[in-house]
């Protein structure tokens, strides 16, 4: 399975690394590229823009810091088009109301 992971902080990097260790193809995107170096060395494909990470992915996992980060990364015109037909697993620490707002877009 090809999974795109957004947000490679403590939790995001650990999830992406685990997926790689289980043989999954993983694309990662982080707004701070330096946080993707270890994942790239482990075999992850590092995307320069969110839509690139989604291009071949069947699903994506977001571990972004807040609703504003989710909006910036995934709710722009290019990324929204690439999200079509993909399973999105939102794992960031945001409130239920913010999750509903994101779903409605």
Image (cartoon, rainbow, N blue to C red):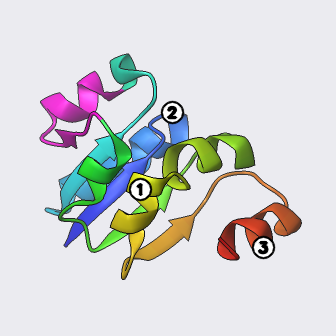
Residue that carries the numbered disc 1 in the rendered image? 79
Quarter holding residue 59: bottom left
Q: Residue at x 18, y 43 (%)?
A: 44
Label 2 sits on a secondary structure element that is loop
Q: Image quadrant for the C terminus?
A: bottom right
Label 1 sits on a secondary structure element that is helix
Does residue 103 sit above or below 85 in this rendering?
A: above
Q: Is residue 3 left or right of residue 77?
A: left
Residue that carries the numbered disc 2 in the rendered image? 9
- How much space separates mark 1 and mark 3, taking CA atoms? 18 Å
- Please state the extent of the stretch shown in magenta in the rendering: 36-48
Mark 1 or mark 3: which comes first in sequence? Answer: 1
Q: Residue at x 17, y 64 (%)?
A: 56
Residue 100 is labelled as 3
Mark 2 or mark 3: which comes first in sequence? Answer: 2
User: Which of labels 1 and 3 is toward the front?
Assistant: 1
Labelled pair 2, 3 in contact (Cβ < 8 Å): no
Q: Residue furthest top?
A: 34
- Whether 17 is among the magenta residues is no
- How much space separates mark 2 and mark 1, taking CA atoms? 21 Å
Q: Position of residue 22 (x, y in %)?
A: 20, 62
Q: Position of residue 90 (x, y in %)?
A: 59, 64
């Amino acid at each position: 399975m090809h999974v795109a992971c957004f947000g490679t902080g403590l939790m995001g990097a650990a999830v992406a690394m685990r997926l790689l260790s289980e043989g999954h193809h993983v694309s990662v995107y982080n707004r701070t590229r330096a946080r993707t170096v270890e994942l790239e060395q482990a075999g992850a494909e590092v995307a320069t823009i969110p839509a690139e990470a989604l291009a071949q992915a069947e699903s994506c996992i977001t571990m972004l810091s807040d609703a504003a980060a989710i909006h910036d990364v995934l709710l722009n015109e290019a990324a929204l088009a690439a999200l079509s037909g993909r399973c999105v697993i939102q794992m960031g620490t945001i409130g239920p109301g913010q999750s509903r707002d994101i779903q409605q877009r």
